[in-house]
Image (tube, rainbow, N blue to C red):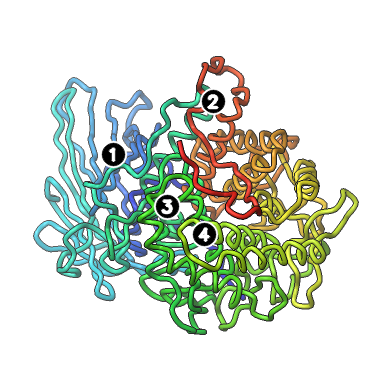
């Protein structure tokens, strides 16, 4: 399957307020040709917004992200002609995302003792491109602007966007496909001049919209009247790096919340900016689960939003099956190279089990029993899919094979075309039974049985028997060995052979109850080796594999959420030394990314002398990376781990400031019951 290279994101400044985001260069300018732009509801509403001073050079000198939805940029204005002296003119630019618009507030300040008159030029373009067109990296033609009454408008495919200015421009032209606005700025001595620009969806294009963005997907910004989705930790970490990472991550997570139009009280986390501002089964479930120590509101909203869209029929073109939880929801078909997905796509082998696990863990964490009871019919359907349809060939394992041309070839979390490889670089052939999916399914069966039993429903014992048989089959089929030692294979291929090559997938087995304590110890030992723990987190693939590439998407890079899952699993199994090492690696990496973790980064070693490389097209922020940071910090704080150099000593009681769920799935009947205070 051919998927084009997306434009780079790693060096862009992002402000966001789901389902909108604005991406630009470090100087604040939105330029054409890359991923720059103002996005809303899966479309790029504005592809260019450059502010210039006629006959002068604008030199950027500073920027700051004041909060997730606001950034500030500062520049000095140097005349093109004249003596090389200090400048008397500064340009301040403040960008804010509101529920319904992008706002740019510009301020020119002069420090001269004489009045000053300058001409300000604003260049604006829009292509109104669906996000998948932008992601393709192909050149997109701008939409012709229409100027009238001091505003500029663009329209395409029934979607419109309007740019307004206050004060109104002195002149508006059309040059090379762009709208060019001119303003005459008159500054008194030591005075200032201000300009406000506003970009929003055209009301004429969507007369039914009354509450901001999301007229097409329905996944809009949450209602302001709702209470906060989680409770902030009572105490911030004493370690300054952890404190900054925690604050940044929670701020970004708040900005990535969306609501379900079928019940706007239900909130969930969009997957990431800018490509994934929508509902993703796997991503939204993991993100909610990692935030459970701070409250159950997001978990409840995520569970219900997905339950409303649970598979009801056999629809091969969408890979929908009764009881199955979806992979992603889009306002229109996704077309990316040869990849074509319908608006509601169910091609995921793990989201259904993850849904069951979140329901159980949210119940344990205090989700009201009435809310749990309402979801029990969906629980039964999900468990039926796991134990029946999920095992397509009846061998006792859950596997997948893409059934539709143009759909995802790999349907676990490593869903790139080359995400599952043999140690000699060969691609594994489907159908594939991923190791971690068996762990998820085992935990889902055991925990689902406990839920049914606790609510007085039948069917618990057959689920426990099914889980016990899965444990034995897994033990016989998955274990392989290399020079370092034994470990679980990443998958069984279509011929039921274990695919060798140590990968991070094995870490997801920890805490699921699928492994014995001795087997968990073997996995922990393997994860602690330098071929897996690079010092910045857990590599997705061992550096001993011939397929290893630290800059590949899934074959050697580090994903913060993947490392966080390993940390929680190791903690659940009691392997705290390995867990601390991996957790500290994530904090170390966060410092390199200004404490806003990307989706993934290069899997280089801390022993290397060079900088930690960014993955060029990684989303930043990404929900499960931010939620993973919260989980990692929670673990470090709960274990009383030593702070980084330069931080004050820990205070008494601070270890409990941010608790974290690290319980192990117990296979004894009824043993994983509700946690009560």
The residue at the point 19 percent across, 44 percent down is 196
Q: Nearer the viewer, mark 2 or mark 4?
A: 4
Q: Is residue 623 visible?
A: no
State the CA–CA distance, disc 1 to disc 3. 34 Å
Residue of label 3: 299
Q: Is mark 4 on a helix, strand or loop?
A: helix
* Observer-nearest of 84 and 22: 22
Q: In which quarter of the image is residue 48?
A: bottom left
Q: Earlier in the sequence, mark 2 or mark 3?
A: 3
Residue depicted at x 54% and y 15%? 648
Tell me where residue 467 appears, x and y as whole percent. 67, 63
The quarter in which the C terminus is drawn is: top left
Q: For the residue carrying disc 1, how many other residues have a C-alpha within 10 Å: few (<14), some (14-19), or many (20+)?
A: many
Which label sits on residue 94?
A: 1
Q: How far apart are marks 2 and 4 (CA)?
A: 35 Å
Q: Mark 2 points at which residue?
A: 655
Residue 453: mark: 4
The residue depicted at 61 percent of the width and 29 percent of the height is 639
Distance CA(mark 3)–CA(mark 4)? 22 Å
* Label 2 close to label 3 by CB (< 8 Å): no
């Amino acid at each position: 399957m051919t998927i084009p290279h997306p434009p780079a994101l790693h060096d862009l400044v992002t402000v966001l307020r789901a389902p909108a985001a604005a991406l630009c260069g470090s100087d604040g300018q939105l330029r054409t040709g890359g991923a720059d732009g103002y996005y809303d509801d899966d479309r790029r509403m504005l592809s260019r917004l450059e502010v210039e001073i006629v006959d002068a050079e604008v030199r950027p000198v500073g920027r700051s992200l004041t909060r997730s939805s606001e950034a500030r940029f500062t520049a000095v204005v140097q005349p093109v002609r004249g003596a090389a002296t200090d400048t008397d003119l500064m340009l301040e630019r403040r960008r804010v995302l509101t529920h319904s618009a992008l706002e740019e507030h510009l301020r020119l300040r002069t420090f001269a003792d004489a009045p000053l008159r300058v001409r300000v030029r604003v260049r604006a373009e829009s292509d109104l491109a669906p996000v998948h067109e932008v992601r393709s990296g192909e050149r997109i033609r701008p939409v012709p602007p229409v100027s009238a009454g001091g505003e500029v408008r663009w329209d395409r495919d029934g979607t419109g966007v309007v740019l307004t200015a206050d004060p109104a421009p002195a002149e508006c032209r059309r040059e090379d496909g762009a709208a060019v606005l001119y303003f005459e700025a008159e500054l008194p001595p030591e005075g200032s001049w201000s300009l406000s620009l506003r970009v929003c969806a055209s009301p004429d294009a969507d007369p039914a919209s009354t509450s901001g963005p999301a007229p097409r997907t329905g996944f809009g910004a949450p209602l302001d009247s709702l209470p906060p989705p989680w409770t902030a930790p009572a105490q911030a970490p004493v370690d300054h790096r952890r404190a900054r990472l925690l604050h940044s991550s929670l701020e970004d997570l708040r900005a990535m919340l969306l609501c379900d139009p079928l019940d706007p009280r239900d909130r969930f986390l969009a997957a990431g900016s800018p490509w994934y501002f929508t509902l993703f089964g796997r991503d939204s479930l993991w993100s909610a689960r990692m935030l459970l120590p701070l409250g159950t509101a997001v978990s409840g909203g995520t569970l219900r939003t997905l339950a409303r869209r649970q598979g009801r029929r056999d629809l091969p073109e969408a890979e929908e099956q009764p009881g199955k939880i979806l992979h992603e929801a889009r306002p229109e078909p996704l077309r990316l190279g040869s990849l074509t997905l319908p608006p509601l796509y169910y091609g995921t082998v793990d989201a259904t089990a993850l849904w069951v696990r979140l329901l159980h863990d949210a119940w344990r964490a205090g989700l009201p029993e009435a809310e749990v009871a309402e979801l029990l019919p969906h629980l039964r359907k999900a468990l039926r899919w796991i134990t029946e349809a999920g095992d397509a060939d009846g061998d006792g394992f859950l596997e997948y094979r893409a059934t539709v041309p143009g759909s995802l070839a790999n349907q676990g979390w490593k869903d790139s075309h080359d995400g599952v490889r043999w140690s000699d670089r060969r691609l594994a052939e489907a159908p594939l039974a991923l190791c971690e999916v068996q762990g998820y399914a085992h935990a889902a069966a055991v925990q689902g049985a406990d839920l049914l039993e606790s609510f007085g429903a039948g069917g618990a014992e057959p689920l426990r028997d099914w889980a016990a048989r899965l444990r034995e089959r897994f033990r016989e089929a998955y274990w392989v060995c290399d020079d370092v030692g034994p470990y679980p294979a990443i998958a069984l291929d279509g011929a039921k052979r274990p695919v060798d090559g140590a990968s991070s997938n094995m870490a997801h087995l920890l805490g699921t109850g699928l492994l014995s304590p001795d087997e968990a110890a073997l996995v922990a030992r393997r994860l602690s080796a330098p071929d897996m723990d690079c010092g910045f987190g857990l590599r997705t693939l061992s550096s001993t594999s011939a397929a290893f590439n630290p800059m590949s998407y899934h074959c050697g890079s580090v994903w913060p959420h993947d490392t966080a899952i390993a940390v929680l699993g190791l903690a659940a199994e009691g392997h705290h030394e390995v867990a601390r090492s991996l957790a500290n690696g994530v904090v170390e990496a966060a410092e390199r990314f200004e404490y806003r973790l990307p989706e993934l980064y290069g899997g280089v070693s801390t022993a290397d002398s060079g900088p930690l490389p960014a993955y060029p097209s990684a989303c930043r922020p990404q929900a499960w990376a931010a939620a993973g940071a919260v989980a990692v910090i929670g673990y470090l704080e709960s274990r009383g781990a030593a702070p980084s150099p330069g931080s004050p000593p820990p205070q008494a009681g601070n270890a409990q400031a941010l608790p974290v769920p690290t319980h192990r799935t117990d296979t004894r009947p009824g043993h994983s019951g509700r946690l009560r205070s």
